[in-house]
Image (spheres, grey):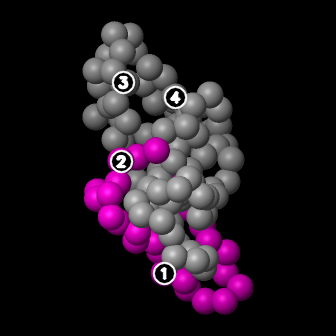
Amino acid sequence: MLTNPGSAPCTTTAVARVRLVDGSGTELIQGAPASGTGQPSRSRPDGSVTTLVEASNYRGAAPVAPVGIAFDINGIATVVATPASNTDATVPPCNGPGQPGTIQMQPWSAS
């Protein structure tokens, strides 16, 4: 969930570039640049938007906890989602040699 703490509405692109990152800031999987397609999402003051992120096929070294999702918002800010636990180092399993890691998000949805 991305919350707008301001007193004015906030608009963001339908999707952001997403990355799987570890507690040291190391990028584990990088998503494709945001396509800019789709309806922009608008949150009211003190409102929020949510999304679903899917990641697969991590093949690297054991990450530093906590592992989280970073959203590059409108090319002007990066927001890292708060992980469920500060000790969570869960990454998607490797689905086979030679397969790249992937991460993608669904469009933001106002809540």
Disc 1 target residue: 93
Is residue 109 depicted above or below 103 in this figure? above
Q: Residues within 10 Å of mark 4 (few under 14, many from 20)?
A: some
Is residue 3 visible to the viewer in this orientation of the structure?
yes
Marks 3, 2: nearer the viewer: 2
Residue 34 placement (x, y as % from top left): 64, 43
Q: Earlier in the sequence, mark 3 or mark 2?
A: 3
Disc 4 target residue: 12
Residue 57 placement (x, y as % from top left): 56, 77
Marks 4, 1: nearer the viewer: 1
Disc 2 target residue: 82
Q: Secondary structure at mark 1?
A: loop
Q: Residues within 10 Å of mark 1 (few under 14, many from 20)?
A: few
Q: At 57% from the left edge and 31% from the top edge, which residue is drawn? A: 77
Q: Nearer the viewer, residue 3 or 68?
A: 68
Q: At 29% from the left edge and 59% from the top edge, which residue is drawn? A: 85
Give, as a single range, the part of the protein colored magenta: 80-105
Q: Residues within 10 Å of mark 3 (few under 14, many from 20)?
A: some
Give the CA separation, mark 1 to mark 2: 21 Å
Q: At 38% from the left edge and 36% from the top edge, which residue is drawn? A: 2
Give the CA separation, mark 2 to mark 4: 19 Å
